[in-house]
Image: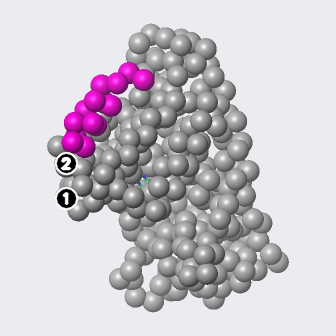
Amino acid sequence: MSAKIIDGKDIARRVRDEWRIRADKLKAAGVTPGLAVIMLGDNAASQVYVRNKVKACHDIGIFSDAHLLPATASQADVLKLIDRLNADPRIHGLLVQLPLPPQLDVHTVIERIALEKDVDGFSLYNVGGLVSGGTVFPPCTPYGVVCMLEYSNIPITGQNVVVVGASNIVGKPMALMLMQKEATVAICHVKTRDLAQFTILADILVVAAGKPGLITAPMVKTGAVVIDVGINRLPDGTLVGDVDFDAVKEKASYITPVPGGVGPMTVTMLLCNTIQSAERSAAKLGIKT
Ligand code: GUN
């Protein structure tokens, strides 16, 4: 039996259609949601991500403000710009694209972003919220994965989930979000011995390791839901995930493709967080939407 393909593009379109209505209501009340993005240097992947974020804002009809700084920018310059955008009432979401050049301290930079504008959800306060169940902004990629599972009517409560990859951006918040939804969660990472003995137990397997071909069919339980967060460019230019898609789809019940799976969801959830931030800001000002 071949797995059902979870179509990230289609779900992203449906989520955006719902949130466009909320953005339109805000605009009708005189509040245009706005997202500011700061990028340093010319990292090729970051350039693509930032371009996609700006385009997504345009497509859903919200304001975007991209600041492209040289890789040599000082920490003081970056903090000054963050302070200015924190104080700018047109901006409801503010993010600094990672990775940063080595002269910048990532924690200092992230902690400078106003909590109510941290739409990436990377600040310590937001991470603490994930741990205690009171998240302000869920981080976009794991938020997108949860959204895909929910739109596909895949139950999470009580399921055995294995997350492969323990990054701050995906693996750790993913595990916390699924634990909050009462899944039983194990996190595996580069130092895990015999990865297959964990993955084979997973009802839901989320892979975010950045290694093409890491997950092969014998590592997957028959009927598992397989979510591939990996995005890897092969030497021939092809984009692939971390999962051997063709073989694993014959064993799984649901699987996400790469491209067209989790990728389109990440930017979509960033738009959701930005619009939600604008709604909170409007409510604080007593503006009814
Ligand atoms: N670099 C890779 N993914 C992300 C992301 O989601 N947000 C930011 N700010 N940087 C990234």
What residue lies at 73% left-to-right and 70% top-to-bottom? 253
Q: Is residue 241 visible?
A: yes
Label 1 is placed on what type of residue? Gln
Front residue of 68 and 239: 68
What residue lies at 53% left-to-right and 13% top-to-bottom? 30
Q: CA distance from mark 2 to mark 1?
A: 7 Å
**Relative image position of residue 70 (x, y in whole percent):** 31, 51
> From the image, which quarter does the C terminus lie in?
top right
Q: Residue furthest left?
A: 76
**Relative image position of residue 100 (x, y in whole percent):** 30, 57
* SS at badge 1: loop
* SS at badge 2: helix
Q: Please state if 282 lies on the left or on the right of 255 as rendered.
A: left
Query: Quarter of the picture for ligand 1?
Result: bottom left
Residue topped by disc 2: 75
Circles 2 and 1, Cβ within 8 Å, touching? The answer is yes
Q: Residues within 10 Å of mark 2 (few under 14, many from 20)?
A: some
Q: Is residue 160 visible?
A: no
Front residue of 240 and 277: 240
Label 2 is placed on what type of residue? Gln
Rendered view: 126 above or below 249: above
Which mark identifies residue 103? 1
What stretch of residues is rendered in magenta? 77-90
Q: How many marks?
A: 2
**Relative image position of residue 33 (x, y in whole percent):** 51, 27
Rendered view: 174 above or below 193: above
87 magenta-colored: yes
